[in-house]
Image (spheres, coloured by chain):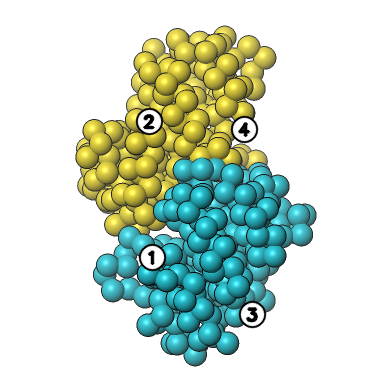
Chain colours: A yellow, B cyan
Amino acid sequence: MKLQLALDTQSLEESLALVAKVQDCVDIIEIGTPFILKEGNRPVTAMKKAFPQLLVLADTKIMDGGAFEASAAFAAGADLVTVCAVAYDATILGVIEAAKKAGKQVLVDMIATKDIVNRAKEIDAMGADYLCCHTAFDIQSTGASPLAELKLLNKAIKNGKSAVAGGVKLATIDEIVEEGTQIVVVGGAIANAPDPAAMARAIKERMR
Amino acid sequence: MKLQLALDTQSLEESLALVAKVQDCVDIIEIGTPFILKEGNRPVTAMKKAFPQLLVLADTKIMDGGAFEASAAFAAGADLVTVCAVAYDATILGVIEAAKKAGKQVLVDMIATKDIVNRAKEIDAMGADYLCCHTAFDIQSTGASPLAELKLLNKAIKNGKSAVAGGVKLATIDEIVEEGTQIVVVGGAIANAPDPAAMARAIKERMR
C-alpha cells in the first residue's frame, strides 16, 4: 500500500522542503491540480530531479487531448498522470496509450462520476493502472467521505488497482486499510500538521 | 459576436508573436489547457500585460476547488476562466462566486456532458455567464461537430450566453453564425494557417 502526498497550495520551495522532511514515509509525490495551474510542469520536473527515488504524479485531471497532454507530463518527468473518468473514452484511451509508450502509468480520477460501478468497469476494461475514488474538496463539507465509493470500486475492478483520495486523515486511515487499496492520497492532513514528518510516519505505520 | 483564439501548442514567444499579428481581428485570447499544464498561469499574465485591450481566458477546465482555482486565475490576470459542466454543482457555484467577487466571468465547458439540455438548464440557473458546447479534440476525427449541440444549447439557455468550440474553421463558420452564438472559439484554423492574420480577418468578417 503506497502513501501519496498531495501538494496543492504550497510554493515550489515550500514543497521541496516538505518532501525533504517526509521522504522516508511517502511513496508518491502528487503535484496537485492547483499547483500545476499555477506553475505548469515545472514542479513536476523539479520534484523528480530532487527526489528521483520517489514516484511523481502530475494531477493533470485531463479532460481532452489525452495523448498530447499525458505525453507532455511524462516528458516533464511524471511517473503517473491523471485523467478524469467523466472524460470521453477516446481521451482516457489516449492517456493509457501515451503511458504505455512512455513506460509510465495512469490514474483515472473518478471525481464527479455518477454511476461509479459501471464507469469503473468500463475504465478497468480499457487497461487503466489505477482507478481513484475521490471525494471532491468542494463537497467534503457535506460530510461525504470516500470509503463507501472505495468499497464499490474494489468490487468493480478486475484488472487495475484502486486508490482513494479526498480528506483522508489519521482518524480515517484504519477503515481504509481494512477495506484495502493500493494508493492512499493524503494532502492537508500531512502538509498542515504541526509536525508533517511525524504525521506522515503515523499514517504510513497504520498502512503496514 | 466575439472571436476567441485558442492557443494550445505554441510557446509563449510564438503565442505573443501570433497575437500581435491577429490582435485587430480577435476579441478573446484563450490560454489553452495544454499551454496551462505546461506553463501554469505565466502566459495568462504575460498575454494580459502585452494586450490589455483584449480579454484573456484561462482554459483551466476546473473539476474541483472551484473558488480557489478560479480566484488564482483571476489574480493572474484572466478575465474569464472555464469550469467543466461535468464537475459537481458546488464546484461550478464556487467558480461563479469567485468570478462575481473579482468582477470577472465564467465560461462553463459542456465537454463530455451526456444530457446537454438538462445540464445546460441547471447551469444556466446557477448564473454562469457563458455555456460552451465543445466537440472534444479527441472525438473530432469521428466527424462530430458542435453545431447540433449549439442548437440544443441555444434553446436551453435563458439567462447566460452560448459559445461554441471544437474544430471551428472558415468552412463551418457560416452555419454557426446563422444559428447564432456569442463566442466562437477557433484554434488551429487560425494558428496553423499559412497567413494567420488573413485567416482571422476572413473568419471575423463572416461574423459581422
Kind of residue sitting beneath label 1:
Asn
Disc 3: host chain: B
What is the C-alpha distance between the residues marked 3 and 4?
37 Å
According to the picture, the residue beneath numbered tag 1 turns out to be: B192
What is the C-alpha distance between the residues marked 3 and 1?
36 Å
The answer to whether marks 3 and 2 sit on the same chain is: no
Residue at image coords 42%, 48%: A62
Q: Which mark is residue A9?
A: 4
- Of the 4 image quadrants, the one containing the N terminus of chain B is bottom right
Residue at image coords 60%, 22%: A13
Disc 2: host chain: A
Query: Residue B208: image x %, image y %?
Result: 58, 87
Query: Residue A82: image x %, image y %?
Result: 40, 41
What is the C-alpha distance between the residues marked 4 and 1?
36 Å
Specify which label sits upstream in the sequence, 3 or 1. 3
Kind of residue sitting beneath label 3:
Lys
Camera-side mark, 4 or 1: 1
Circle 3: element type: loop
Query: Residue B184: image x %, image y %?
Result: 52, 74
Quick check: marks 1 and 2 in contact, CB under 8 Å? no
According to the picture, the residue beneath numbered tag 2 turns out to be: A77
Query: Residue B200: image x %, image y %?
Result: 49, 74
The answer to whether marks 1 and 2 sit on the same chain is: no
Q: Residues within 10 Å of mark 3 (few under 14, many from 20)?
A: few
